[in-house]
Amino acid sequence: MFQVKMENLTSISESFLVTRNPVMIGLSVPMLQSVSKLSLYNNPKMVSLRLDKLERVNDLQVVQTAIHGLGRNSVTRLNSLEIGSNPNFSLIDFSYLVSINGPLSIVNNDPQASGNFPVLKKVGGAVTIRNLARINLEQVSSIGDTFNMIGNSFKNFSLNAVSSAGKDIAIMDNVNLNELSFSNLTSIDGGLQIKNNSALEQISPDSFPKLTTIKGGLNIYGPLTNISLPATTNILGAISIESSESLECNKIKAQFRSASKGLFNCTEKKISSPPTKKELGDSSSIHSSLPSPNPSSTGVPLRIELYQLSLLYFFFIFLH
């Protein structure tokens, strides 16, 4: 086991890669202020990290480590951010981060992890949020690509500053989710999927109150008793709705009659009183005959790399 300390290093003009070091337990670069790309990848025993002064970084990747967090940082802008598969990473705090030009991915860290982005306003690429207990994206007003919220444990979620989504929105497998709010969303350039959220019993009029246009399809599946998209007037793709509860598909069809431009399918649980075992397995379906349209549908030069122990030795010789 070993640690790496670079106590006086303040800047790196290109990349700083710490990659595939199976016995490295710590990295301390307390004076580092700027670096083009910082990648900590596949260092499974790394438990400590010091980046106290970090202010400027273009691309930040922390994947497959044992660290608990990044500590203090003053980063305000990024090109990309990936934090994934760090089983102890519990606090993802970017209190000063205002914009990400490319993708944001927070995936499969500590199951109790929280993501805090209190002043983040723009994400130019895709957003993927997975296996988080809490998330704050309240100020995000622009998402340039897909938005994926999958397998999280929080009970409610709001993204009320966003007015349009660049591609698909997918909200799936969030077992405790019972409330959604996209209060200012007016258009989605892709499709909307809301599936397998076992505690979500309704999409209320307050969930998407201003959503007028979905350029892809609408796919909803779960134990829903009510679906209301009061402002939606234009859905270019197919509509597929399936509920394991009583949903009243006739009312759903009437709601989307003028908005639908493609195939419509609604399936609900049909239960009589008292229900028989056979009846509990029955369902009723409503189909329209409308035709289905076509669906909508960096490498940086290395400057510093810590790669396994043998190369590390030469790295220290170089520093001295």
Image (spheres, grey):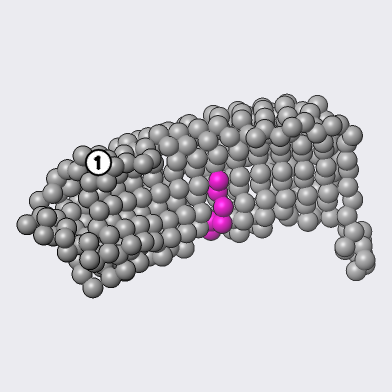
User: Local crowd at mark 1 within 10 Å, few (<14), some, or many (≥20)?
Assistant: some
9 to the left or right of 127: left
Q: Up-down: is 222 above or below 193?
A: below
173 to the left or right of 256: left
Amino acid residing under circle 1? Glu
Q: Up-down: is 290 above or below 60?
A: above
Residue at 67% across, 50% down: 195
36 or 269: nearer the viewer:
36
185 or 293: nearer the viewer:
293
Q: Residue furthest left?
A: 320
Splitting the image into 4 quarters, where does residue 5 fall? bottom left
* Number of numbered markers: 1
**Residue at numbered disc 1:** 14
Q: Residue furthest bottom?
A: 1
Tell me the quarter of the image containing the N terminus: bottom left
State the image coordinates of residue 313 (x, y, percent, origin top left).
17, 64
Residue 79 inside the magenta-drawn segment = no
Would you say residue 263 is visible in this rendering? Answer: yes
Residue at 87% across, 62% down: 281
Splitting the image into 4 quarters, where does residue 81 fall? top left
280 to the left or right of 87: right
State the image coordinates of residue 200 (x, y, percent, origin top left).
66, 52
Would you say residue 55 is visible in this rendering? Answer: no
Tell me the quarter of the image containing the C terminus: bottom left
State the image coordinates of residue 80 (x, y, percent, origin top left).
39, 41
171 to the left or right of 100: right
User: Which residues, given as a range, are shown in magenta?
Assistant: 148-153
Residue at 22% across, 66% down: 310
State the image coordinates of residue 174 (x, y, percent, origin top left).
59, 55
Residue at 11% across, 59% down: 317
Q: Secondary structure at mark 1?
A: strand
